[in-house]
Image (spheres, grey):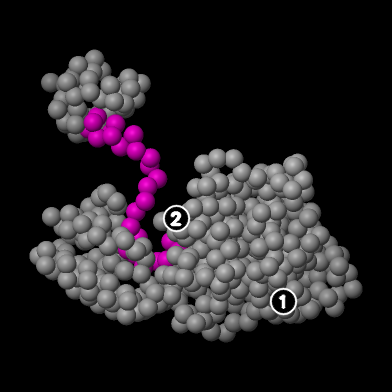
Amino acid sequence: MNPYRQLPSVDKMLEQPATAAALAHFGRDAVLSAIRQLLEESRAAIAAGEDAPDLAELSERLQSRLAAGAQPSIRPLLNATGVIIHTNLGRAPLSQAALQAMHSVGQGYSNLEYDLAEGRRGSRYSHAEALLCELTGAEAALVVNNNAAALMLLLRGVAAGREVVISRGELVEIGGGFRIPDILRQSGARLVEVGTTNRTRVADYAAALSSDTAALLKVHPSNFAMIGFTAAATLAELVQLVQETWYFDTISVLNDLGSGALLDTQPFGLAHEPTVQESVQAGAAATTFSGDKLLGGPQAGIIVGQRDLIAELKQEPLARALRVDKGTLAALQATLLAYRRGQAVAEIPVWQMIGAEAEALARRAQTWADQLIAAGLAVTLRPGESAVGGGSLPGQTLPTTLLALATPHPDRVAAALRGGDPPVVARIEADTLLFDPRTLLPGQDAALLRAITQAIS
Ligand SMILES: *Cc1c(COP(=O)(O)O)cnc(C)c1O
């Protein structure tokens, strides 16, 4: 029999008893559209040589499709990977203060662009600016949608139609197709490459300066490290070079920091990640960084720098296109206030995770192991490494204790974990599933253990 003829009609599907309930619950349009999609997919499957699904199977698929369609597709999950700033998993979890700020500003009206003292229109840019200046030592600040946007706006404002000098060692790709040379081109600036991949000296920049030079750009190599025979000019050296050049007042030294740490990473046993304060101190005309990397706040791109330069950027039409939402500003301010109180490590999840003590992680993993072994699972503990991630501190790790689950089908178990509610994302190494306590938030332990037990059974 022709397999296409075995497929039920839309009407036949509508007549199924379960469909009646679905109609009442999800509405006729959603049900009809899901039925048509299913039938179309079935025809495509038949064309590819598969059997026609029967009515019962189609009914069941219809129900699960409708249920899934009624849920938001973006949802919370448990990050057991041990990568703290995981770009695929939403980067920085927000602090309680940031969440509260978003909630209270989001549920009603706010003075986003309203000057309460004067009773007239204000500027959304005013909200985080004073705090950013206080924390970084900069004269002025501007917040846009993300750091890629910040860099684009900065280059357009400073260098459109003119030259930007950059080391060949810093023409990097950050990820997700974000490449520095492309951003430069899109901003309308002309790229002038100097030095070599592994070594660039101040003299290389000096030789490239001309009356057409608008800026020297330094880009922090966030996600890779070069070892061996390497050299790079420091920011301070570039600032000095520009000051010694007779047409210096037309050349800006710009610094794209990427992760934008406000705290020193060394006390946590990590290498030094350049801080925003150091960049400002060294004399960068503008420094750009992300809000959701080491700052530990919402997605945002922050530009701090000289007053005149920032004032010009605010006037760029592009700034309007890249502007941030009230929720972002509220969360960013709340996050920055934790730094101002000296409570960043205590309150901001990214720093809590970086600062988690090895003994505390070992105890937490031991508790997991005890409970899973009691439930009959074969798990062990082993020393391992967590990563900061998010384009910061490449190759640097923090010691941790991993829960290891050996299984003949690690991919299948990992898929079951991802398909659970909440989904769990773990690491697989040499046929072993690994769970790192460092990136599990407080209070997520029971849900993790339940998910592991279910995925195994
Ligand atoms: C991450 C990063 C960016 C991009 O920042 P987003 O906030 O993701 O847009 C740009 N430059 C550097 C050096 C980075 O590390």
Residue 358 vs 191, above or below: the answer is below
Residue 177 visible here: no
The residue labelled by disc 1 is 282
Q: Which residue sits at x=43%, y=70%?
A: 352
- Residue at the limit of the structure toward the right, as seen here: 246
- Left or right: 419 as drawn, with respect to 184: left
Closest to the observer, 432 or 320: 320
Q: Which mark is residue 391?
A: none
Q: Is residue 109 left or right of 431 when viewed as pictured?
A: right
Q: Residue furthest left?
A: 376
User: Three-letter amino acid code at disc 2?
Assistant: Gly
The tag earlier along the polypeptide, 2 or 1, is 2
Question: What secondary structure is found at the residue carrying circle 2?
Answer: loop
x then y, percent, for residue 319: 70, 48
Viewer-proximal residue, 81 or 329? 329
Residue 331 picture quarter: bottom right
Q: Which mark is residue 90?
A: 2
In the picture, the quarter occupied by the C terminus is bottom left
Residue 23 in sight in this render: yes
Q: Is residue 183 above or below residue 81?
A: above
Specify start and end residues of the magenta stretch as a single range.
61-86
Residue 393 vertical position relative to residue 419 in the rendered view, above or below: below
The kind of residue on which mark 1 rests is: Ala
Image coordinates for residue 328, horizontal then vertical, percent: 56, 51
Task: Name, please, the residue furthest toward the bottom.
Answer: 229
